[in-house]
């Protein structure tokens, strides 16, 4: 282990001290093929900047070129320690459901403090409209359907729409090789049996929930089955899931406080996914504030505020341990907010399960003392899968496997990033009457976006620069752009078609009187017309 750590230290020093050369340390050769762009520039707000920041575009000042004292004196001084990485992933948080994002009916001081302490990405997107595909993209750096996860992974074969490829290279495994201690606390959602259990896919420690959603935050079950684990052991902890994950994260930080080995902690909360089931104290507190909130909105606000408090406790533990100064903290959500639970997606159209902006654009904040300038923001267009190479670059790793993500490291540390041309894709496969086991898609080039929200509806075309709220369908007016984006989409569908998304034999066909399992809880906000569709 000491040898591996020394190697990681040397690699990290080489990358950081040389200013992070674009050809290898920031992007893999495969990523370079998809040269950069609509990312930075041609976003929904119409900006042409590579990175836009608050405070006079401070991220591009010349004193942040990466050629400072560390680069000049790296051979003479003790090599810097690779950073810890704390990645906080929340579940179904709407783009507008933070007080720092303009929400006036809730209070999120601790997440807001992260925004103030670091860089906010204004155009950050989840890789899918639902959780499993986004989590697959996060941990592989690839589009999710290229690693076998076009839809939600569930325990029941008849409603399962993904299988994480055993051949895929996962982030925690790479970080292990670089000397990191790796841990997942919270929700996994990428498989319930070997070979796709967390400890088999690169995590030294797993303490959390294997399945998709919890039917009860206190019982921690899904359809009556307990999916809580401590590594491979089934456990029955007592308490609200958010409190448990918070405390387990704090315990982990305390255990690592005296260890010089860098760590990667993925803290993946179930909240604020339905059922909106906050602890009674938080529900009472929000209800007493008044404001005319509906019962649904009151419950969701209370669940988000409870989540915010937990994140605040984790960050406080990081500070008390003295780990904050050497830790890169990333915060984001797996998809947009659930409108059926009365989530707030800001001014954006749509929400979870939809390819409109509200379903895929999510909050993202990066905090890294002395590296990322506080109170800054970026208009760079980025996706969840970009966090994979970003973390690898910060850790001093060159990615050898094929990935689709592009490192955001230069943006984070205030260096000028080259313009990029990227064709971006989103996919979701689902069952039930609305989807019938088929896919629906979105594809974006520059400010043009082609999308559908059901396999059976026509594609719509939007110009996000002129129409950020996606109100004016231009498909009939601009058939040339539709044809161009459609061709790019067809090529992607062909490529993904070679990747299996089911493990082993095909599920047995249902008999005439069989139907897919239906929600047991009234807190699952499904419409009656889709009662047979199991939505995550």
Image (cartoon, rainbow, N blue to C red):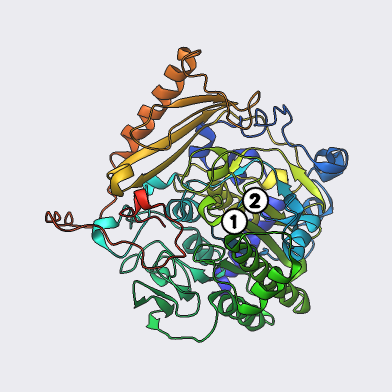
Nearer the observer: mark 1 or 2; the answer is 1
Question: 126 above or below 260?
Answer: above
Q: Position of residue 391 (x, y in %)?
A: 60, 55
Q: Position of residue 405 (x, y in %)?
A: 53, 43
Image quadrant where residue 124 sits: top right
Relative side of 64 to 208, left or right: right
| Callout 2 secondary element | loop
Mark 1–mark 2 distance (CA, rounded to whole Å): 8 Å
CB under 8 Å between discs 1 and 2: yes
Which label number is shown at residue 93?
Answer: 1
Q: Residues within 10 Å of mark 2 (few under 14, many from 20)?
A: many
Residue under pointer 2 = 363
Image quadrant where residue 65 sits: top right
Whether residue 488 can be seen here: yes
| Callout 1 secondary element | loop
Query: For the image shown, how many numbered marks are present on the structure?
Result: 2
Q: Earlier in the sequence, mark 1 or mark 2?
A: 1
Q: Residue at x 43, y 33 (%)?
A: 452
């Amino acid at each position: 282990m000491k040898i591996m750590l020394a190697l990681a230290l040397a690699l990290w020093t080489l990358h950081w001290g040389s200013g992070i050369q674009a050809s290898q340390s920031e992007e893999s050769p495969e990523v370079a093929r998809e040269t950069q762009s609509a990312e930075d520039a041609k976003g929904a707000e119409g900006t042409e900047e590579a990175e836009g920041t608050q405070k006079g575009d401070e991220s591009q000042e010349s004193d942040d070129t990466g050629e400072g004292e560390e680069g000049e004196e790296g051979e003479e001084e003790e090599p810097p320690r690779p950073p810890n990485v704390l990645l906080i992933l929340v579940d179904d948080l709407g783009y507008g459901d933070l007080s720092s994002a303009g929400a006036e009916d809730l209070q999120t001081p601790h997440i807001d403090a992260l925004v103030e302490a670091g860089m906010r990405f204004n155009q950050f997107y989840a890789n899918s409209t639902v959780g499993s595909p986004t989590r697959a993209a996060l941990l592989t750096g690839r589009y999710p359907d290229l690693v076998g996860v076009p839809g939600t992974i569930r325990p029941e074969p008849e409603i399962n729409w993904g299988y994480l490829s055993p051949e895929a290279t996962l982030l925690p495994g790479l970080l292990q090789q670089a000397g990191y201690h790796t841990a997942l606390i919270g929700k996994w959602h990428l498989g319930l049996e070997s070979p796709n259990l967390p400890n088999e896919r690169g995590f030294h420690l797993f303490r959390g929930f294997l399945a998709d959603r919890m039917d009860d935050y206190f019982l921690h079950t899904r359809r009556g089955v307990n999916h809580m684990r401590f590594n491979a052991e089934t456990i029955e902890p007592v308490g609200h899931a958010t409190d448990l994950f918070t405390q387990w994260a704090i315990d982990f930080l305390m255990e690592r406080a005296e260890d010089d080995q860098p760590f990667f902690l993925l803290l993946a909360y179930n909240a604020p996914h339905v059922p909106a089931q906050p602890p009674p104290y938080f529900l009472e507190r929000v209800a007493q504030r008044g404001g005319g909130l509906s019962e649904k909105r009151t419950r969701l606000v209370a669940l988000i505020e409870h989540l915010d408090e937990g994140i605040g406790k984790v960050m406080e533990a990081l500070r008390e341990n003295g780990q904050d100064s050497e830790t890169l903290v990333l915060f984001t959500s797996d998809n947009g907010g659930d409108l059926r639970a009365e989530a707030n997606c800001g001014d954006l159209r749509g929400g979870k399960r939809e390819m409109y902006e509200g379903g895929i654009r999510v909050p993202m904040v990066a905090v890294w003392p002395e590296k990322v300038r506080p109170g800054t923001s970026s208009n760079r267009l980025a996706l969840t899968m970009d966090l994979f190479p970003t973390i690898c670059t910060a850790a001093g790793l060159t990615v050898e496997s094929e990935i689709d993500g592009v490192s955001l490291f230069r943006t984070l540390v205030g260096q000028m990033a080259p313009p990029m041309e990227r064709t971006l894709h989103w996919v979701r496969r689902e069952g039930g009457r609305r989807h019938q086991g088929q896919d629906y898609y979105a594809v974006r080039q520059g400010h043009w976006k082609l999308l559908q929200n059901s396999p059976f509806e026509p594609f719509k075309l939007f110009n996000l620069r002129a129409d950020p709220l996606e109100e004016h369908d231009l498909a009939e007016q601009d058939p040339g752009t539709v044809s161009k984006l459609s061709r790019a989409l067809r090529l992607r569908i062909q490529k993904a078609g070679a990747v299996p998304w089911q493990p082993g034999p095909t599920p047995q066909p249902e008999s005439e009187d069989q139907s897919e399992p239906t929600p047991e809880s009234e807190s699952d906000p499904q419409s009656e017309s889709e009662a047979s569709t199991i939505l995550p």
